[in-house]
C-alpha cells in the first residue's frame, strides 16, 4: 500500500486530530495514522481543564456545541492551606476569562466525529515503523504493515513515547528533563462535588485536589510516592487522607462515594528543542511534557497546532515557508513560559521529601502572596486561563 497526501500526521490525539481538522477547513489534505484502535483513543481518560483560548478555538472551528452543553465553566480555584479557604477569582483578575472542565476524551470524540463526518482519512490500528526523508522534499512514513505514506510534511503528534521525536538527528536535538520525586494517586468517585470550584489542598502531609467530571462524578488526587501501588490505598485510607488535606472549617466537607478507578501518575517536566527539523514538525507531548498541576498538556498541544496550521496554510496558499520556519521559535517562546508556570506551581504546592522547615515556610509565603495580593492573583489567573496563542 502506498498513499499520497499533503500532510502526514502521526498520532490521533488532540494535537493530531485538531491539526487535521484545521487543515481540512482550509482545503489542505491530511492523513492521520494512529497505532491504537478508535475505541482506545476515545476512551483514554485524561485531564480536562480547557484554557480560555482552547475553548475559543473549539468554538471557532465548529466544535463548541457539545462542549457548551456538557462542560462546566470554572471561574476560579480554591486554594486551601493554613486551615482556611483562599479563593482566586479568574473573572475578576483577568476581566472575564474562565476555564472549562471538559474531559480530553470528549474533545477527542468530538474531533474524531467531525473528521469522519467530513470524509477525513483517519487510519486507526496502523502502527508506524519509521519516518524517512524529512530533510528532502518528499518525506515518507513507513508503516509496520509494509505500506507507506508519502507527503509534503510530517506532523509528529504521537506523544512522549512516540517515534517522531527520534527521527530528528540526536546531534540536533537538545532535551531538558526533570522528574519529580512524587506522583499523584488519581481517584474517580461517584460523588457530587462539595464545592463550586476546583479545590487544591496544600497540606503538610502533601498535595490534594478536587476536580469534576460531571455534577455527580468527582476526580480527586493525592500526592504519593512516584512508584506507589494503588493497591496500597484502601478506600478508607483514600477518604481519610482527602478529608485531612482538603476539608477546612469554613467550607462544606468532602462528599464521599463509591470509588470506581485508582491509578498513579508520575510527574515530569520535559522539553525538546527545536520542535522542527526539515519537513518534520513536533507538536504536543511529542515535544513537551508538563506536570499536571497547571493543566497545560492538552492546551499546549492546541497552541502548537494552531501555529503549525497557520504556517502550512501560508505555504500552500502563498507559497511562503517563512511562518513554518518560525514555528519552533514561536512555540518554544510560549512553551518555556508554560514550563515556568507549571514547574513553579508544582514546586509551590507539593511537599518534597527533602524539604525542611525553612523551605516549607517559603512555600507558605509564596501561597499567601499568590492568593492574597492583586498582583499574585492576576499573574496566576493569566497563566492558568492561558497565555495567548500566537498565530
Image: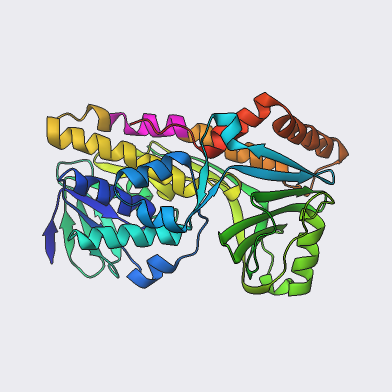
Q: Magenta region: which residues?
A: 325-334
User: Is residue 264 positioned above or below 167 on the image?
Assistant: below
Q: Nearer the viewer, residue 168 or 100?
A: 100
Q: Residue at x 52, y 44 (%)?
A: 99
Q: Nearer the viewer, residue 344 or 188?
A: 188
Q: Nearer the viewer, residue 86 or 283?
A: 86
Quarter of the picture containing the C terminus is top left
Q: Left or right: 142 with respect to 182?
A: left
Q: Left or right: 292 with respect to 108?
A: right
Image location of residue 63, percent across then percent down: 33, 52
Quarter of the picture containing the N terminus is bottom left
Image location of residue 305, percent across then percent down: 33, 43
Q: Nearer the viewer, residue 76 or 30?
A: 76
User: Is residue 379 positioned above or below 227 on the image?
Assistant: above
Any part of residue 25 in sight: yes
Q: Residue at x 33, y 40 (%)?
A: 306
Q: Is residue 93 magenta?
A: no
Q: Residue at x 26, y 50 (%)?
A: 21
The secondary structure making up most of the magenta span is helix
Residue extending furthest toward the front? 69
User: Is residue 263 positioned above or below 17 on the image?
Assistant: below
Amino acid at each position: 500500500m502506498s498513499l499520497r497526501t499533503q500532510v502526514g500526521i502521526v498520532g490521533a490525539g488532540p494535537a493530531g486530530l485538531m491539526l487535521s481538522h484545521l487543515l481540512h477547513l482550509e482545503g489542505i489534505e491530511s492523513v492521520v495514522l494512529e497505532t491504537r484502535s478508535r475505541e482506545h483513543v476515545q476512551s483514554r481518560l485524561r485531564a480536562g481543564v480547557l484554557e480560555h483560548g482552547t475553548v475559543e478555538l473549539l468554538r471557532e472551528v465548529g466544535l463548541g456545541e457539545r462542549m457548551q452543553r456538557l462542560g462546566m465553566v470554572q471561574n476560579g480555584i480554591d486554594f486551601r492551606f493554613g486551615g482556611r479557604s483562599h479563593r482566586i477569582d479568574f473573572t475578576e483578575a483577568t476581566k472575564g476569562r474562565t476555564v472549562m472542565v471538559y474531559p480530553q476524551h470528549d474533545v477527542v470524540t468530538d474531533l474524531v466525529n467531525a473528521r469522519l463526518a467530513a470524509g477525513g482519512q483517519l487510519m486507526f490500528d496502523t502502527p508506524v515503523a519509521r519516518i524517512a526523508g524529512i530533510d528532502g522534499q518528499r518525506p515518507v512514513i513507513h508503516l509496520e504493515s509494509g505500506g507507506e505514506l508519502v507527503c509534503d510534511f510530517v506532523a509528529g503528534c504521537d506523544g512522549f513515547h512516540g517515534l517522531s521525536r527520534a527521527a530528528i538527528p540526536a546531534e540536533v536535538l537538545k532535551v531538558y528533563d526533570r522528574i519529580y520525586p512524587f506522583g499523584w494517586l488519581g481517584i474517580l468517585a461517584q460523588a457530587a462535588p462539595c464545592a463550586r470550584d476546583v479545590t487544591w489542598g496544600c497540606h503538610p502531609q502533601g498535595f490534594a485536589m478536587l476536580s469534576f467530571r460531571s455534577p455527580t462524578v468527582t476526580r480527586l488526587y493525592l500526592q504519593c510516592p512516584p512508584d506507589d501501588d494503588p493497591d496500597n490505598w484502601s478506600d478508607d485510607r483514600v477518604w481519610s487522607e482527602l478529608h485531612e488535606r482538603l476539608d477546612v472549617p469554613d467550607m462544606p466537607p468532602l462528599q464521599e462515594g463509591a470509588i470506581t478507578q485508582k491509578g498513579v501518575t508520575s510527574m515530569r517536566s520535559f522539553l525538546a528543542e527545536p520542535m522542527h527539523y526539515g519537513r518534520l514538525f513536533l507538536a504536543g507531548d511529542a515535544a513537551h511534557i508538563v506536570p499536571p498541576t497547571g493543566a497545560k498538556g492538552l492546551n499546549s498541544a492546541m497552541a502548537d497546532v494552531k501555529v503549525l496550521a497557520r504556517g502550512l496554510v501560508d505555504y500552500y496558499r502563498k507559497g511562503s515557508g517563512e511562518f513554518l520556519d518560525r514555528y519552533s521559535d514561536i512555540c518554544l517562546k510560549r512553551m518555556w513560559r508554560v514550563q515556568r508556570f507549571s514547574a513553579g506551581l508544582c514546586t509551590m504546592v507539593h511537599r518534597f521529601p527533602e524539604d525542611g522547615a525553612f523551605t516549607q515556610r517559603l512555600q507558605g509565603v509564596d501561597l499567601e502572596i499568590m492568593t492574597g495580593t492583586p498582583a499574585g492573583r492576576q499573574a496566576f489567573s493569566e497563566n492558568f486561563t492561558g497565555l495567548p496563542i500566537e498565530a
